Image (spheres, rainbow, N blue to C red):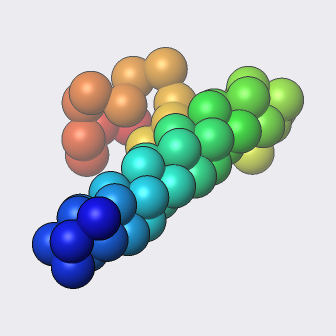
Amino acid sequence: MTHLGYLIAGWGTVFVACAIYAVSVIRRARRVAANVPAERARWMTGKDSDVIGET
């Protein structure tokens, strides 16, 4: 393998690992957020989160 091949393989591995980690963190956060009671949920994750500033 040439130096370029090692470089591409290394960066590719890093990007794939970061993408997998990001997806797992987002999935875990959504799963945990579903267990938060409605009165403790933040406004960004509430039922009407598409409407900002309305109460």
For residue 43, say whether it is visible: no
Up the image or down, 48 lies above or below 24; here it is above
**Image point (78%, 37%), residue name:** 32
- Of residues 20 and 49, the one drawn nearer to the viewer in this rendering: 20
Up the image or down, 17 lies above or below 1; here it is above
**Image point (27%, 27%), residue name:** 50
Quarter location, residue 54: top left
Up the image or down, 41 lies above or below 31; here it is below
Query: Is 13 left, or right, of 34 in this rendering?
Result: left
The percent position of residue 25, horizontal first and vertical second, equals 62, 48
The percent position of residue 36, horizontal first and vertical second, equals 80, 36
Task: Give the residue at the far front of this rendering.
Answer: 1
- Of residues 1 and 40, the one drawn nearer to the viewer in this rendering: 1
- Of residues 28 and 44, the one drawn nearer to the viewer in this rendering: 28
Q: Quarter of the image containing the N terminus?
A: bottom left
The percent position of residue 35, horizontal first and vertical second, equals 83, 29
Query: Is 25 left, or right, of 19 in this rendering?
Result: right
Q: Quarter of the image containing the C terminus?
A: top left
- Of residues 22 and 53, the one drawn nearer to the viewer in this rendering: 22
Quarter location, residue 29: top right
The percent position of residue 8, horizontal first and vertical second, equals 23, 64
